Image: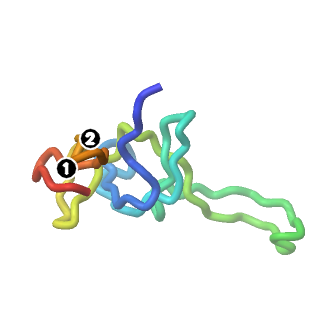
């Protein structure tokens, strides 16, 4: 299994697919499927039966997973970048390959 360089809480931009250009915050990373759920991106409609949590039921819009390869991390300046890892002292840190800054 490959190391996923995008973590939950990161701000990402979609670089390929139907939702290309959309930006959002990563809510969850599904490591086993190499996918992530991004806030407000790849919205699907799901038919829900009435239950205790949703007594009304009906059609609910929710985010669907999108493949990690279609996402790129956004820096604080708002530009896309690739992610690398390096050792600083005895600590392993993520850094932006474009600006060489620690994320």
Where does the image place residue 50, in percent across and percent down from the top left? 87, 66
Image side of residue 37 versus residue 101, left or right = right
Residue in the image at 10% along x and 53% along y? 99
Secondary structure state at the residue bearing disc 2: strand
59 versus 55 height, above or below: above
Res. 23 mark: none
Residue extending furthest bottom? 56
Q: Nearest to the eye among marks 1 and 2: give it.
A: 2
Q: Residues within 10 Å of mark 1 (few under 14, many from 20)?
A: some
Q: Nearer the viewer, residue 3 or 29?
A: 3
Residue receiving disc 1? 96
Where does the image place residue 29, in percent across and percent down from the top left? 51, 48
Q: Earlier in the sequence, mark 1 or mark 2?
A: 2
Residue in the image at 35% along x and 61% along y? 11
Residue extending furthest left? 99
Q: Residues within 10 Å of mark 2 (few under 14, many from 20)?
A: some
Residue receiving disc 2? 85
- Residue 17 in which image quadrant: top left
Residue in the image at 12% along x and 48% along y? 98
Secondary structure state at the residue bearing disc 1: strand
Image side of residue 70 versus residue 102, left or right = right
Where does the image place residue 87, in percent across and percent down from the top left? 24, 42
């Amino acid at each position: 299994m490959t190391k996923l360089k995008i973590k939950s809480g990161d701000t990402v931009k979609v670089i390929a697919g139907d939702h290309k250009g959309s930006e959002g915050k990563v809510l969850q990373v599904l490591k086993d499927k190499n996918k992530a759920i991004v806030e407000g991106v790849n919205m699907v409609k799901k038919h829900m039966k009435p239950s205790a949590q949703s007594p009304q039921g009906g059609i609910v819009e929710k985010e669907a997973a999108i493949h990690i390869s279609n996402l790129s991390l956004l820096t604080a300046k708002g530009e896309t970048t690739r992610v690398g890892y390096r050792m600083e002292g005895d600590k392993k840190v993520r850094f932006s390959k474009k600006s060489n800054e620690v994320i």
